[in-house]
Amino acid sequence: MIRAIEFPDPAEFRRKALPGSFHIDLTNGGPRGAAFWFFCPCGCAGPHRIEVGFCHKPKPEPSWCWNGKLAEPTLTPSVHQAVCGWHGWLRDGYWEAV
């Protein structure tokens, strides 16, 4: 398991590039959603972007439901990273591979 560390500052997020770290951009999401930027827990190149909604999926696919917590984020459904093949869950602030 890898701890998901939230970076409020997007520049610091990109500069540090820590596997499993994330940044939420509330200004750059779809309707009622946000952009969830993250560095894959496996350490491959990034960052990667997915669309999330607070306690809902903002559109049918692909999008994820985010519990709204920055310290202990949870996403549903699981995240499958096509670039490297990593597949797993972000639950209660930890990335877990399937």
Image (spheres, helix red, strand yellow):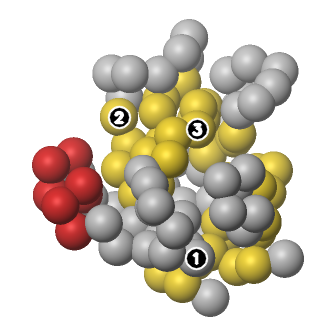
- In the rendered image, residue 5, in percent from the top left (x then y), is placed at 37, 71
Looking at the figure, which quarter contains the N terminus?
bottom right
Which of the two discs, 2 and 3, sits closer to the camera? 3
Residues at marks 3 and 1, CA–CA distance in whole angstroms: 17 Å
In the image, residue 30 above or below residue 6? above
Dot 3 amino acid type:
Ile
Question: Which residue is most to the bottom?
Answer: 1
Q: Are marks 3 and 1 in contact (CB under 8 Å)?
A: no
Looking at the figure, which quarter contains the C terminus?
bottom right
Number of numbered discs overlaid on the protein picture: 3
Report whether 56 appears left or right of 39: right
- In the rendered image, residue 16, in percent from the top left (x then y), is placed at 22, 68
Label 1: how many Cα within 10 Å (few below 14, some 14–19, many 20+): some
Q: Secondary structure at mark 1?
A: loop
Task: Name the residue located 54 percent from the left edge and 15 percent from the top edge.
Answer: 30
Q: Please name the residue that numbered disc 2 is placed on.
A: 25
Q: Secondary structure at mark 3?
A: strand
Dot 2 amino acid type:
Asp
Task: Name the residue located 76 percent from the left edge and 63 percent from the top edge.
Answer: 85
Q: Please name the residue that numbered disc 3 is placed on.
A: 50
Report whether 23 appears left or right of 85: left
Question: Foreground residue, 71 or 35?
Answer: 35
Label 3: how many Cα within 10 Å (few below 14, some 14–19, many 20+): some
Let me know if residue 4 appears in the view: no
Which of the two discs, 1 and 2, sits closer to the camera? 1
Q: Please name the residue that numbered disc 1 is placed on.
A: 42
Report whether 43 appears left or right of 1: left
Residues at marks 1 and 2, CA–CA distance in whole angstroms: 22 Å
